[in-house]
Structures are given as structure tokens and as C-alpha cells.
Image (cartoon, rainbow, N blue to C red):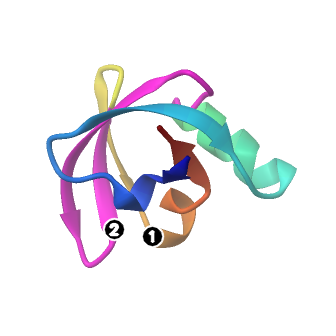
Amino acid sequence: MMPLTMAKPGETVTIRKITGRDEVRQHLAELGFVVDGVVTVVTEMAGNLILQVKDSRIALDKTLANRVMIS
């Protein structure tokens, strides 16, 4: 497992685990980041990510992206 920040633009990955406090995990779940969910990295700028989750594009900062573990 590795953090979402390690994924390259254009790569589609599967979420395996979400770490952090309950509030952080709940917030990410509300955005569509759930275990076994599929996420595509659209672009990366200074460690911050633009992600395609289902039918939405979402921006995550480096801190939040590091809480999402992928494989």
C-alpha cells in the first residue's frame, strides 16, 4: 500500500484504506473516497491532486491525499 500522493497523473487506482481521525475519514467518505472505490488522478500540482471520483472532479491537498492508501 502507498499514499494517493504517489500515484501519477493519468493513473487509475483502487482505494484500500483511509487513515486519520473519524471526522477526516467521514469527510473523505462524503466526497466519494471509500474503500474499494476507484479514483483517477487527473493532474498534480505541488503535491496537491485533482482527482476523478465517480462523475466528479475533486481537488485534495497533499495532507488529505496522504491519508488515502491505494494499491
Could you say which is closer to the camera, residue 65 or residue 70? 70
Secondary structure under tag 1 reads helix
Residue, disc 1: 62
Was residue 49 drawn as part of the magenta stretch in this picture?
yes
Residue at x 31% of width, y 59% of height: 49
Was residue 36 drawn as part of the magenta stretch in this picture?
yes
Magenta segment? 32-52
To which quarter of the image does residue 14 belong? Answer: top left
Please rate how many residues cluster around mark 2, counting C-alpha atoms within 10 Å: few if below 14, some from 14 to 19, many from 20.
some
- Among numbered discs 2 and 1, the one appearing first in the sequence: 2
Magenta region's main secondary structure?
strand
Residue 48: assigned label: 2
Say what amino acid the circle numbered 2 marks: Asn
Residue 32 x/y as whole percent: 52, 29
Q: Left or right: where does residue 38 sit relative to residue 19? A: left
Q: Left or right: where does residue 43 sit relative to residue 29? A: left
